[in-house]
Amino acid sequence: MKRFIFGVILLAATIKDIVAMTGLSLGTVSKYLNGHQVKEKNRVLIEESIEKLDFNVNLFARGLRTKLSSNIGFIVPSLELTFSTKIVAIIEKILAEHGYTVIICVVTGDSKVDKAKLQNLVYQKVDGLLVIPHANHQFLQQWLEVMVKSIPIIVLDRLFNSSTVQHFVLVDNANAAFKATELLIKAGHRDVGIILGDRGGYTSDERRKGYLQALDHYHVPIKDEYQVYGKYLKAEGYKACEQLLKLPNRPTAIFVTNYDMTLGVLECLNEHILQVYEDISLIAFDLDEISKVIKPNLAIVTQPVEEIGYYTAEEILKSLKGNHANPEIKILECSIQQGASIKEIN
Amino acid sequence: MKRFIFGVILLAATIKDIVAMTGLSLGTVSKYLNGHQVKEKNRVLIEESIEKLDFNVNLFARGLRTKLSSNIGFIVPSLELTFSTKIVAIIEKILAEHGYTVIICVVTGDSKVDKAKLQNLVYQKVDGLLVIPHANHQFLQQWLEVMVKSIPIIVLDRLFNSSTVQHFVLVDNANAAFKATELLIKAGHRDVGIILGDRGGYTSDERRKGYLQALDHYHVPIKDEYQVYGKYLKAEGYKACEQLLKLPNRPTAIFVTNYDMTLGVLECLNEHILQVYEDISLIAFDLDEISKVIKPNLAIVTQPVEEIGYYTAEEILKSLKGNHANPEIKILECSIQQGASIKEIN
DNA sequence: TTGTAGGCGTTATCAC
DNA sequence: GTGATAACGCCTACAA
C-alpha cells in the first residue's frame, strides 16, 4: 500500500502503511509512537518502516483524539520591543527542539479586535499560552482567568492579582530601579527625574517604588513634579522629557524606564541642544544594542532576557507534560551596565 | 444534547449539537458552515443555534478532512531585525482578520537544526509559507523548491533563481543604492566607501550595482578597496569600518547598507573619535526609529516595510483561496530620508 | 505485549 | 436544497 511513485510522495504515509509493511497491528504501532513498551524486534521493524515510508504522525488526526496541537501561543503587546522579540526567539528555539511550534498573537489593546484574535488562537490551536500582557489590559486578564482552567499559562513581565493565573516570570523592577537611582544619587545628583510608563501599571509602580526607596534611603527629598509618565512610547517619552526640562529647577539627572521612551528623550534632548552627561545625566532601560552607539555611551539597566526566555520555555514544557499546576512567581534580577552618561557633580 | 452545566461549558459543542437543536441534517449545517446556499429559514435557525451553543468548528476534524490548518508559517532568519518583526506584525494582523494564525519559525542557518524545524513546521501545520531567507541559505532554498509544490509560498526581501518558487516581494535595492550614493556624490564626495552584507548575496549585489552605477554615472572613479563586506552583522560592520578607516586615502563618506552594520560603524567611529558629518559623512539603511536619536541625525534609506507587509498578506490570502499560482515578482521602491550626516565638501 | 474495534467532528459524495 | 453515509488517521479501552 505504498504511496510513492518514482520516489515522489503522493500521499503521506499513515500508520496503516506501517501496519502493512511490518505485519504488526495498528495498536502496537500506535503504542510505539506514544512511547509505550514494544518488543525490541518490533521496535526495530517499526523504526525501519517509519524511515522507509518517511512517516509522520498526522497531527490533525491526533489532535482530533487528544485535543492537543503541539502549538503554543505567544501573546505579546507588540513586536516592536526588543524585549518581546528576543524572548520570543529564545522560546521558539527551545520549544522547537521539543516538537512544539509557536503561534504569535499581537494584542492591540482594542478588546473587540483582541477578542476575535484570542478566540481564533485558542480554538484548538494551542496547548499552552505564554503572555506578555499589555499595560492595563483588563480584558486580556479576564480572558486568561478563564483559559487557565483548560491550558497552562505563564505570564511574563507583569504581575496581576488572580486566584487562577499563578505562574509568573518577572524581573525585580523595584530593585533595578533602586540601583539605577542609587547610581545617580551617588554621583551627587539630588534632582533626579524619572520617566515612568503607565500610571498605576504594575511595572511602573514597581520601578517607581525602587526610585522612591533610593531617594528615601539617601535622604534625597522627593518631588512629585520629577515623576512623569510616558506610556512606554517614544513620542510620549519626548513629551515627558520636555515636561521635566520646563521645570523651574529642572532635574540634573533622569532615569528613563524603557527603551522606546528613551529614544524620545534622546530626540528631545537633541532638539533642545542639551548634551547628555554635560548638561544632563541619564540612565535608561533595555537599550542594549544601541547604548554603545550613542554618544556618550548610556548607562543602562538590562533585563535578563535570555534567562527569562530559557526559564519560561522550561516551565511551559513542564506544565505541558503532566503536572498541570506548578504555580510559581519567579523573579529574576536585572543588571546595571555602566556608561558615560552620568556626570559626577560636587 | 447540550454540554453546559450552570452556564459552564463542559464540552465544546459540535455540529451534532446544532443538528439536535435545529432538527436539520449534518450535511445542511456543514454546508452552511462552508458558505454554501441554505434556505433563509434554516440559515436563521443555524445561526441562532451556533450563538446559543457557542459553537466553533473543530479545526482538528476539519483539518483531518481538508488537510488545512488555517495557520501560515513565517520563516525568518532572525527576530532581532526590525525589518522582519515589523513585517511579521503587519502580516499577523491582516491574516488574523481572515481567521489565520501565524506560526513563527526562526531558521538558524545550521541545516541540521533547520531541517528538523522546517519538518515540524510543515507537517500539517501550515497552509502557506512566507519566507525571509537567510543570506546564502542553500538548504532552505532547496526545501522551498519542494514545498512549493504543495503549498503557496511567497519569498520576501531576496530573489533567487528557481523554476518553481516564483512569488517574490522585493525592494528596488539597486535604485535605492543609486540614490543614496548619488546623494553623497552630489555633496561633493568622490571617495565614497560602501559597506555591503554578504559577498555574492542577492541583496548585496543589487546594492553594490546601484552604488557602482551612481559612481559611473557621475564619472567618479571606482575603487575596489572602498567596497567592503560586513555580513550584515554589527561586529563585522565595526571591522569593515576599521578597514575603510585604515586606507591611505580613506573615504570621506560611507554608505552602510543595513541596520546592524550601521550600529557597528557608529561604535567604531565613536571609538576612533571621529565625528559623523565633521570627519566623515554617512548614509545608512533602515535606521528608522533611531536615526533621529543619533547626533547628527542620520540620512537613511528606508524600506517600505508597511507596504511590503500589506502587499504580502494580500497576496498570500489570494493564493490561499484558490488560484494557487499567481507567480509574480513585485518590486517596491525605497525612500530616502534626509539627515544631517552628509557634509557638503567643495 | 499485542490485536480489535469504536469514535473523535468534519467534509464530501451521493441520492433524493 | 437537503439528508444519509462513508471516509479522514489516530488513540484507547478492552479483550486476547
Image (spheres, coloured by chain):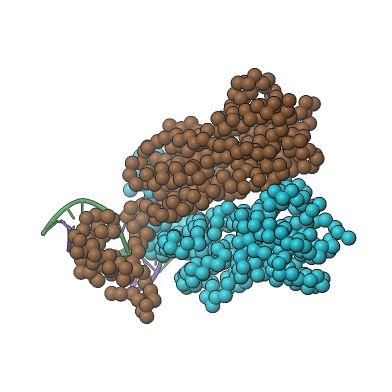
Chain colours: A brown, B cyan, C purple, D green
Residue B242 vertical placement versus B294 (above, below): below
Q: Is residue A45 left or right of residue B159?
A: left
* Residue A229 x, y percent position in the rendering: 67, 33
Q: Residue at x 33, y 53 (%)?
A: A66
Name the quadrant containing residue A249: top right
Q: Residue furthest bottom?
A: A6
Q: Residue at x 56, y 30 (%)?
A: A174
* Residue B286 x, y percent position in the rendering: 68, 56
Q: Residue furthest right?
A: B346
Name the quadrant containing residue A219: top right
Q: Residue at x 45, y 45 (%)?
A: A310
Relative depth, front residue between B44 and A143: A143
Residue A327 vertical placement versus B271 (above, below): above
Relative depth, front residue between B335 and B221: B221
Q: Is residue A306 left or right of residue A69?
A: right
* Residue A63 x, y percent position in the rendering: 36, 55
Residue B39 vertical placement versus A172 (above, below): below
Q: Is residue A320 visible?
A: yes
Q: Is residue B126 left or right of residue A79?
A: left
- Quarter of the image for the C terminus of chain A: give it: top right
Q: Is residue B53 visible?
A: no
Name the quadrant containing residue B284: bottom right
